[in-house]
Amino acid sequence: MIRVQGLFCLLVFLFLGRLQAEVLNGGFERLTESQMPVAWAPLPDSARVVVTRDSVHSGEISVLMSGYPAGLIGDAIAVQAGAVYVLMGWARVDSGRAFARIRWLADDQTAVDESSATTEVTSAAWAQWAGAFVAPPKAAFGRVMCLVNGEKAAFDDVRLHQMATSMPAGLQLEATDFSLRGPRVAKVRVTLQDSVVMNRTAQAAGQNRAGYDGAAVIFQASRGQIDPWARVKNGTATARLRDADDHVGGVWVRARFAHLVARAYVGDQNAARLRGRLFDADTGHPLSGQIIVADSLGSVLQTGFGTERGFVADSAFVIDIPPGNVTVSARRDFTHQPPEPRVLHLVRGEEHLVLLPFEPWADLRARGWVSGDFVRGTPTAARARGLDWAALPAHVNGDLIPTLRGKFVESRWGKQWVLGTTGIFGPETPGFDVHARAHLDRGIVGYIDLLGTSGSTSLAFDVLAGPTFDALNVAHPNARAAWFALLNRGYRIAGTAFLTDRRFRTYTQVPGDLTADRLMRAIANGQNTITNGPLIAFSVFAAGPGDQLPAGRKRRATIRAWAAADPDAYLTRIELIRNAEVIQSWDLDDQPRQYRISTTLEDSVKCWYLARCYGADTSHVALTNPIFFQTKNFVPPQPVQAVVRGTIEGADGSSVSRAVVKVIDPIGRTVLETETRDNTFQIWVPATSRIRVEAEGYEATSQRIFDHPDIQRIIREPVDLPDLTALDKLTEQLQALDMVFALKRQQPKARSIRR
């Protein structure tokens, strides 16, 4: 009987072990907070994850998750940097949506990047998802994350396959028009384009379009229904677009293969055709812009993918829309006057031409100033906004405008942006941790939101600890007041206005050719001007914003201001600000379109100056970053060191005779190592440090200074941003931190018994 029971237990154990081994990608585990992507909560304790053989689609098992929201992450799979991978699987959801991502890992299993999502599944029945991805540089492993934002989801047969060792050069998208008669159905075909010239090694390896067969191309339509994805076969993939029979007008289609994107237009032979061209009125050079077509009732005809009014046009456009009276207008940026709106009467079956010339207004590019921002769309959309560069979460081929890697980062400690990198930052990552990782990748980082309680107090800690960041978004008046207060304390922090939903724009003066490194250094150095309409330039002889001059000399300063590009805009006031105080102002009662002022500056003490101007009211504003006047003995504020008095004790009350204390910085490097004396130690360490204590016979333990209860108490207090008294409170507390490290004894290892 005992043998039968033992054999039964063994069979159950082997069966469960085999079942676990068959779980997708070698087994899933619960996501911890540090592993979850931003804006996704960790898997709740109440959620359940089960492996079942019931209701599977095609595989041998399925994984069922319940909880809101929930997620699973697979084991690490070896990958090759630069190679193309396709992720495919089946999913169903009771409500909400489900999708998958890939977390890319380095050799040491640290995250280096995270892919975009696969196609979403929102069906209660089994539906297949797909996505193609490229392993980024430094990637050695990938972990598949199955995510659900809903009550319950099931996943089956989720697999990651390598398709090719390199990416194609681009995508070519072709589409047929809707016919005059019959159902509104069109075919859309994608062709993967190889490089024109392939080296012999690639040819010998057989790298051609057929090498991508089986991969998935994702499709999206601005209206109607299109196949969400299609497999590549012989280098092409085809999808079918269906639109309602009572609709009139063309449809845009977008295809994506990994980070390659292509667009095509499905025309409508039943509609009126509107053809337009955007160009510089002086030179005739083509320009991009945002086109708005409104009908006789004022309703805007949405013919693009975005949520904004109108659509993006890259110098020329052709659209098919319902016949009737329409008004066509265009907009671009702050340095071109928009064309007059055109009123047209469109006739079915006929083609109508509209010319949209932009009048140059203030040519800042000729003065070395460039503008850019973080964009969610494509380089074409960024160029249509008049941007000279764009930050994107993934590399995009093309030469429309220079692109940099960058993204928005949100945690409970504040909203930030990183430029020059797209590293992984979880919702619990403190600001200084984000900054250290960004700087390790030679990127820069800035705070966006200074107005939330937690965000502003984390800002205070990061100021004292470095500053650990490079810039602040100063579009809001309260944020400007905090910025001025920091400048008055001697901190050199750049002012920017990125990620403000187009309300503000940041212009940066970049010497020489526009390169990613020069741009990032110029932004961090404060060679910036921000505006939401008017434009302003400030110089002291050859020096501009971000520059430093020796105090004690008389110098000539020049301010030049322009109203917004709108022909009806005008200037009302110009101000010269010294150390946060307006020391000179000029009221422009005649409401000029542009104005130039010269004045004399002379200071024998350290100070800073910047210029500000207003449009029709104070809500329309532009201001520069400061020019600094410094004395010979000026020393900027140094990072505040934390004074830690530590006590070591056993968790069971025992005395720990000897322990090693290590100080670890945010990127994991040991910067200091010492030993305890009489179970205590006292050290001076950077405020961003983590202290780790090790002792023989005990489990190592660590604590981060930022997590100390006394520090957290101050951080959670409401903050008066212009006053920033939190800086003084934190400084005082950092000088006297008591920390207790309770060490648990190591469990003895089980010894094997020989028989």
Image (spheres, helix red, strand yellow):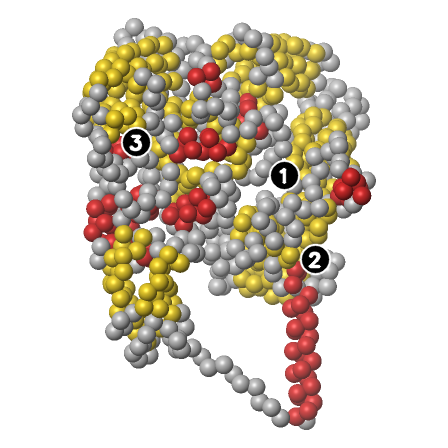
Could you tell me if residue 649 is visible in this image? yes
Instruction: Give x and y (percent) for residue 423.
Output: 50, 46
Residue type, mark 1 in image? His
Q: Which residue is mark 3?
A: 480
Which of pointers 2 and 1 indicates the residue nearer the eye? 1
Q: Residue at x 75, y 19 (%)?
A: 269
The correct choice, above or below, for 324 with respect to 662 in the image is above
| Up/down of 583 relative to 374, above or below | above
Q: Which mark is on residue 259?
A: 1
> Which residue is at the far front?
632
The quarter of the picture where the N terminus appears is bottom right
Q: Earlier in the sequence, mark 2 or mark 3?
A: 2
Alpha-carbon span between mark 2 and mark 1: 24 Å
Q: Amino acid at mark 2?
A: Asp
**Mark 2 or 1 closer to N-term?**
2
Residue at 70% x, 57% y: name it: 157
Q: Amino acid at mark 3?
A: Arg
